[in-house]
Amino acid sequence: MVIQLEEKKTNLVISKKDKPLGALEVAKIQLEKAANKMNLDPNILAQLKEPERVLLVSVPVKMDNGKVKIFSGFRSQYNTARGPAKGGVRYHPNVCLDEVKALSAWMTWKCAIAGIPFGGGKGGIQCNPKEMSESELERLSRRYIFEISPIIGPKQDIPAPDVYTNPKIMGWYADTYNKMNHSADYATITGKPIDFWGSEGREEATARGLSDIVEEAAKYLKINPTKATVVVQGYGNAGSIAARLLHEQGYKIIGVSDSKGGIYNLEGIDPLDVLEHKNKSGTVSDYSKASSISNEDLLKLKCDVLVPAALESVITKENVYSIKAKVIAEAANGPVTPKADDILFKRGVFVIPDILANSGGVTVSYFEWVQGLYGYFWSKQKVNRRLKKLMVKAFGEILKISQKEKIDNRTAAYMYAISKVASSMKIRGIWP
Ligand code: NAD
């Protein structure tokens, strides 16, 4: 199969001096852009530029070969004006303090947009979970949660899954925390397994929230899902479930990828069949009912909806002109750099920013927290119904701002989130 990846350039000019930005620089640029637009009080802005608290920990783990290896771990609590810090823990070789800070900033905005009573937090461990045995991972996870235990708790900071962490790891976290405190606490960790007081619907919540938002965007943009195509980069929790749910809405999935490479088939790909294959072989890239494509070229496929669902900064000034999607729904955090953002807006691409598009995960984490505090658990239907209500509301609020101000959706989302956080900060004041 041959595909055309023609490059059409617009007449926008980009400075050649632009250097690649880290996630934290990206987060700061986004914040300042929105703050300028809304004339944010400089005293509030100064506080919003830095996290409230960061914790660096050394995590010693006895490896299977008997040697002790020290891993670097992080936890950042960015802003807690609206409630306890909330955010996932990422296991990745490239995790660093600045990335964790940026992710915790994005969590702050996301929780404000979702209208849930949390601030933003995030954690990470610099490690390669793919090269570790299950027992090494368990020891790493339990020791990490012990190390950050002084600053977490149901009313302090509530960890959850992120890249390369999952319900099993959340179960180890929750068990360790409970054993340490001789208690039965169901609300300090979310994203737990259902049989350890997780919430129905949590595992697919990020993708479900995204598919609810894409449904709203499609109505607004008059896209008929049964005649539209989708490309998904990253086939983990967010990406694989987004592919399935969008397929259920009628979209044709024409390309997907993971860290080992991508596949495409313009006739359509069955997302469940690909997932079954990935579960057996460890990757989508050798799936036989589609052709191979690199992660870079996958992003350039002509499609209606592009879902980046892997890591940060994959759409940059270098490849933005090759993007042919009409809608970009950011399942991943920070997949589009600020320069690329400006160009996408000028080109009329409808970007649904991460802090809105993937807020379904933290929204159902909030539901899990509420259920854990009460010890009273809801059905999946109730979870999904309540999730959709919040997602649709948030989409409507942000669209109203972007239309009124004639600005991109990301800046509108930031303005909406910042105004909520700033209002809480003003009410609470600076102590002492
Ligand atoms: P995951 O670990 O379940 O999946 C990550 C996927 O990305 C895997 O398929 C992996 O192979 C792929 N990947 C890694 N590097 C890649 C690369 N260079 N190119 C292409 N694919 C690559 O993680 P996840 O939970 O699905 O998270 C994915 C993104 O969604 C992250 O940005 C995360 O912060 C964001 N997110 C996740 C949640 C959640 O609840 N899981 C919530 C909000 C946002």
Image: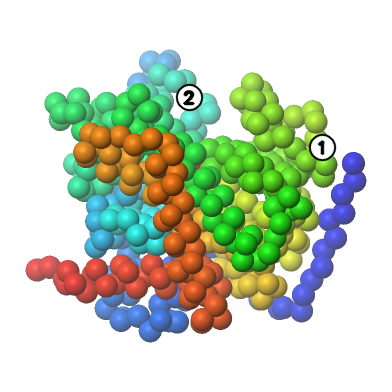
Helix, strand or loop at label 1? It is strand
Residue sitting at x 82%, y 68%: 8
Image position, residue 321 (x, y; %): 74, 66
Residue sitting nearer the eye, 221 or 320? 221
Residue furthest to the right: 2
Residue 144 in view in this figure: no
| Disc 2 target residue | 132
Left or right: 310 with respect to 365? right
Kind of residue indicated by mark 2: Met
Q: Is residue 351 left or right of residue 87?
A: right
Location of the N terminus by quadrant is top right
Give the image quadrant in which the ligand numbered 1 is located: top right
The amino acid type found where label 1 is placed reads Ser
Q: Residue furthest bottom?
A: 39
Residue 248 appears in the rendering? yes
The residue at the point 66 percent across, 76 percent down is 346
Foreground mark, 1 or 2, reads 1
| Residue occupied by mark 1 | 291
Residue 294: x and y in percent read 75, 44
